[in-house]
Structures are given as structure tokens and as C-alpha cells.
Image (tube, grey):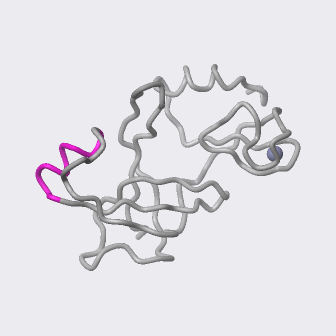
Amino acid sequence: MGAHISVPMYQRAVPQRYRLVGLRCRNCGRVNFPPKGVCRYCGVGADFEECRLSGRGTVHSWTLIAGAGAPPEFAAEAACKGSYPVVLVELDEGPRIIAQMVDPPEEGPRIGMRVEAVFRRIYEEEGVIRYGFKFRPMT
Ligand SMILES: [Zn+2]
């Protein structure tokens, strides 16, 4: 498979064959996810190669979201559960992702706990693609 892909191509391809793939900047070597036209780290690199992300990472921080005012992708769950944890996860490859946590420990997520991504779905709202995966505790 060719190493070069354009970002618009990548985004079109996502709904058909979703994989947890970041783009490694050829200038600074850091992994951008979600992909951007210009590297978010060095601000220079616009030449990327695909990099499969493990989906594994560490909880950096978390918060509890209450039902009211939940973003649409969380609304159904919020309606039946009342509230749910959302975690900021630092992936092993470096990017940080905010997502809902499923099957959290009863006492709530812990800073530093190991988690893995589970794919849910993706959709677009107001031009912003929402990455529809959640994290669950790594077993
Ligand atoms: Zn870079």
C-alpha cells in the first residue's frame, strides 16, 4: 500500500473501512490523530505516512458528564443512565483523544489506568467528524 495519502482521501475512506490510523509526520516523526493538513506538532510537516494506532493508552484525566446538555452521540446513553464518564486518553503513540468510557470501574476511572479503544461509529456534525469509539478498561 502506498505510504502517501491525502487527508481528504483519508476522511472519505473512513466510514467504509474504519481503522484506528494516525498519520506520522515525516518532518518531526510525531503521530497526528485525527489527521490534519499540516502537522499539529511542528506546524511544518505536510508529508505523512500512515501509522496504525494500537488503540491502547492511559487515562490522563476524566470527567463525569450529566445527562442534560450531553452532545448528541451521548444523549441516548445519558437519558437512560443519567451520567457517564468521559476520559482524556493519551495513546501509546502520543495523540490524546477524548471519548466516553464504557464499563468503567464502579468507583470511576482512575488517572493512569490502562484502557483500549472499542469502535462504535462515526458521524459528522456541523462539519466536524466525530470519532465514534469509546474506551474500556484493558483486561
Ligand atoms: Zn511534524
Magenta part of the chain: 73-82
Of 17 and 38, which appears nearest the observer? 38
Viewed as shown, does residue 121 lie left or right of 131? left
Q: Position of residue 27 (x, y in %)?
A: 88, 43
Q: Answer above or below: position of 110 versus 43.
A: below
In the image, residue 40 lies at what x, y percent?
Answer: 72, 44
Quadrant for the N terminus in the image: top right
**What residue is at 46 percent from the left and 60 percent from the top?**
116
Q: Nearer the viewer, residue 63 or 120?
A: 63
The extreme right residue here reads 27
The residue that appears at 61% across and 49% down in the rendered structure is 53
Task: Name, please, the residue furthest toward the left.
Answer: 80
Q: Is residue 68 magenta?
A: no
Q: On the rendered image, what quadrant is the C terminus found in? A: bottom left
Identify which residue, 77 or 118, lies in the foreground: 77
Is residue 92 or residue 17 the one in the foreground?
92
